[in-house]
Image: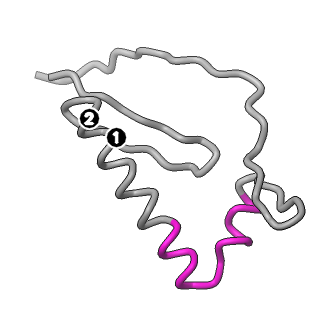
Amino acid sequence: MRRRSICLPALDLSTSGKTLEEARKRFGEAAMLFFDELTRRGTLGEVLGELGWQKINRSWKPPMVVSQQSETIKIPVAA
C-alpha cells in the first residue's frame, strides 16, 4: 500500500497518511503539538535557533532552502 508523506525540514518534522488529505491533517496536528510543547516548556526560541531559524525584529524567519529534491527508494523485505 502506498502512503503519502509530508516533511518539513525547517522544523525537522514529518508525517504520513493513506491519502494526502490524511497526511496533511496529521501534519497539522503534529505541528500544533510541536509548538504547544515548546511554548509550554519555554524552549521555542532555543529549538528554532538550533534548527537554523533567525529572529529578525520580532518574528522568526525559517532557514533558506538551497535545494529540494524527492527521492523514491526500494527497501528489500525478507519473505
In this view, the residue farthest toward the left is 79
**Dominant secondary structure, magenta:** helix
**Which numbered marker is on residue 21?**
2
- Give the magenta part as a residue range: 35-50
Q: Secondary structure at mark 2?
A: helix
Residue 46: in magenta span: yes
Q: Are marks 2 and 1 in contact (CB under 8 Å)?
A: yes
The amino acid sitting under disc 1 is Arg
Residue 38: which quarter of the image? Answer: bottom right
Q: Which residue is drawn at the image coordinates 77% and 26% (left, top)?
A: 66
Looking at the image, is 3 positioned above or below residue 51? above
Residue 28: x percent and y percent?
Answer: 39, 52
Q: Which residue is drawn at the image coordinates 48% and 38% (left, top)?
A: 7
Q: Secondary structure at mark 1?
A: helix
Residue 77: x percent and y percent?
Answer: 21, 23
Looking at the image, is 3 positioned above or below residue 46? above
Residue 39: which quarter of the image? Answer: bottom right
- Please give left or right for residue 20 compared with residue 61 in the image: left
**Which numbered marker is on residue 24?**
1
Q: Nearer the viewer, residue 40 or 56?
A: 56
Q: CA distance from mark 2 to mark 1?
A: 5 Å
The amino acid sitting under disc 2 is Glu
